[in-house]
Amino acid sequence: MKGSLIFNIQSNNIILAFGYKKIILALEQFSINSFQAEENLLQSFFTRNGLTSTMVKNVIVIADLSSSINQSLHVGDNLAYFRIAQSPIEFEPISPIVKNTDFNIHTFNLSFPNNPESKLQIKKTLTALLKLSINKIAINSTYSLIHSTNEEQIIEICEKIYPNVFTYYPSYIYNIPNFLLRENVLLLNYLLFNATKSLNFSLDRILKASSLTVPIYFLKGDGTLVNKEEILKYPLLTKQAEFTSYLLGASYYTDQKDAIVIVPDHNQIHLGLVIDQSPKTNNVTMINNLKLPGKYPIFKSFNTIPSDSKLEEALKLLNPFLGSIPVLNLVKKIKKSPSLQYPLLSLPNKQQTQIIGALNAPFTLSVEKTTSLFAVDMKEKEKKHLLDQAMTILKKNNIHLTDMNHQFEANSLRYLEQNLYFFKLTIHGRLT
Amino acid sequence: MNYHLKLRGDYELKLMDKSWIEPLYWGSIFLGSGGGGNSEFLTFLLNEQFSKKPTLPLLDLDEIKNESEYATVGLMGSLIEETFPTGFEGINILERAKSSIKSNIDGLFTLEAAGVNILYPILVASLVDLPLIDGDAMGRAFPELHMTTFYFNKHHLIPFVISDSQGHYYDLNEKDIFMLELTARRIVSQQGGYGSFAGALTKGANLKRILIPRTISFAAELGKTFISPGSYSELIENLMMVSKNSLYGTAVELFIGIIERIENIENIDWETITIKGTNTSENSTFKILIKNENLIAYRNNKVAAMVPDLISIVNLETLKPVTNTELQEGMKVSVIGLPAPIALKKEKALEFIGPTAFGYKSRYESLEELYFSYYY
């Protein structure tokens, strides 16, 4: 039998598991230190559980990388941030997060690269950065969704002035149509890069020690899997992945397509919603009062065990259906009560629930494009083009899917330019 | 939120500070009645500005001088997500508008105490060191310049200067506000979709007659209820309490449900939202007709609220008011009605801002008429 090897990485420990669909053949917990230090961790796990590396078809990681933001803020890093806009924007970027920390963002308002003064402005700025010993530059230009060339040209100018001195983090790679949201994503992802790289380094080392060369996928907050490369670029996508694994696991474990799940989290309790075996998501989420775009699960939280009436009120607010839906409970202290009008089903094991969640998560791949449309049939042509592109990526990365379907979105960006469209094609499927 | 009071002659001057930003932000969304734009980026700019200059005087209408000149600043069009005003363009256009008169400007006011046009005038006022008047000419959000109390009171808005998103300036001199609106709208839509404007230089004596008083401080009071709302029932109670003691009227819960559909009506700029009832409204359907703002609401095909009364939507997951651009199918919402101030309900005003002004064929029925037993 071939199955998936799961790494569930939490703040203090790591859970290693092996399984397929709803079957878990092995599950062990280790301290996080042994994950970083012991190369043979996986080998000994295999030996103890009678597994071999040939049985592993892929690796799935559950890790909420956004939780390492606080750690990164106290490293004492310096980052230069170029805001390329029509007029100066005078407020500190991501200030609710970086305020009173050791992380310093030196923000510079610069003009567009086609501006005659731009080159001189950049030269002065770079010289100042060198004096401050800063060699990392994040760049966000207005309209980068449609004109990535602005940021590319800025990098080109910088490289001509000081070749191979600076490392650049451009914003256009995120395809986010909102300057401020893109800024938040760019800078917060930057804060997570080191932790993400270090996690991947440890993971690669452990897999290599067991001669495992299988694809690695991460669970995203929206309850789908993506390949490692995407997470290295956009670690914020894993925000709430741990919570999502509970939601998915509870739903698959009990075969309930629609349910509310009560999830423990240290001293808190979260309530989330599953609809058709996918977490119900919002298009934005918050980190310390900062808005982030993207699909993240909605939730309601309690700091203590809620009274029946408070729980009932929260369930009613979350429940999108008429009448009650099953409540799948992972918090031991919450018990069935006659006053609760929702059917409550307690699940026996938290760890197994998370692993089942990861084993059953679907895979997604999104390809995006911004272009102007001048003929009616162009939309169909673009859709086909994106589909071809997605298939090529899947083939190149040796990703085989079953139950495959796709979703095509065409959003008009009329407010940016006439006839401009943002196309997104998302492939969904199950890893074979 | 702190009300700093500073003695100035016989008056106690009200001062706005950083603590006003968040209440005004939520209040601006609620009073936007679905439209008015989202001013989140302005909260960042204002926060920075109040760090440099911690307070800004907010003048009651009875504090302004009859012979002094006051001007408006604001934003029009759809604010886009890529480039946005930073306040500095407001300084330039204000200077340009001022050049047509010999005297100084003693304060600023907003035409629209909702959406982006609450925080933007505060930002510009702070940058140019002028007080802001606690009042406006719409009492809510409306899409066009002639939907202001200036038009109903037959007062022009010139001089009127626009700066487009590309940094070009336009001096408009149409005395007829309807013509001014057409010219301004043409410029804005051709030049990137949004523009900043300044002008409507008006003597204090006239403003006392034209503006709806205390709408800025009302927006802040209203917004305060959304900051830590506790439960939904507490939020509703607080909203009722705040609105009861205002020029508006007591807020009323119109419907609770889940958004089933958001649809565009082809060829005309109307949208509809269909909400399926939950809780006590389980078997009912609520529909809202939208043209920039929420204009007319129906419960089971019967009129439930009409413009100029405000129809605002609260997201029940967050207990915060939302603009129409944030609505999603499946979102659990509460629809709240708020009676418009009397100035908007007079016959001469209804001609320009009542349901018929938007093409609807029936006469205006106020919330007080529709929910008679609730109000009387």
Image (cartoon, rainbow, N blue to C red):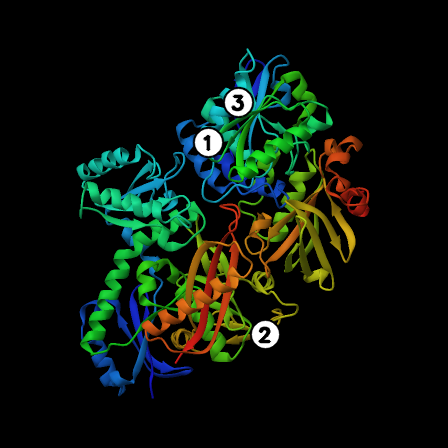
> Which quarter of the picture shows residue A118?
top left
Above or below B308: residue B167? above
Q: Looking at the image, which is closer to me, A94 or B180?
A: B180
Q: How many marks?
A: 3
Whole-number angstrom distance, CA of label 1 to CA of label 3: 26 Å
**Mark 2 sits on what residue?**
A343
Amino acid tagged 2: Pro
Say which residue label 3 marks.
Answer: B131
- Give the secondary structure at mark 3: loop
Query: Above or below — where is B60 with respect to B276?
Result: above
State whether residue A70 appears in this view: no
Q: Position of residue B305 (x, y in %)?
A: 74, 47
Helix, strand or loop under label 1: loop
- Disc 3/disc 2 C-alpha distance (Å): 59 Å
Q: Residue at x 67, y 21 (%)?
A: B208
Tell me whether the residue at label 1 lies in contact with that at label 2, contact meaning CB atoms closer than 8 angstroms: no
Judged left or right of residue A221, residue B299 is: right
**Label 3 vs label 2, nearer the camera:** 3
Residue A204: x %, y % from top left: 23, 70
Name the element at disc 2.
Answer: loop
- The answer to whether B191 appears left or right of B355 in the picture is left
Q: Which residue is mark 1?
A: B167
Which is more toward the observer, A11 or B264? B264
Choose top left, top right, bottom left or bottom right for residue A24.
Answer: bottom left
Mark 3 nearby-residue class (10 Å; few <14, some 14–19, many ≥20): many
Q: Amino acid at mark 1?
A: Gly
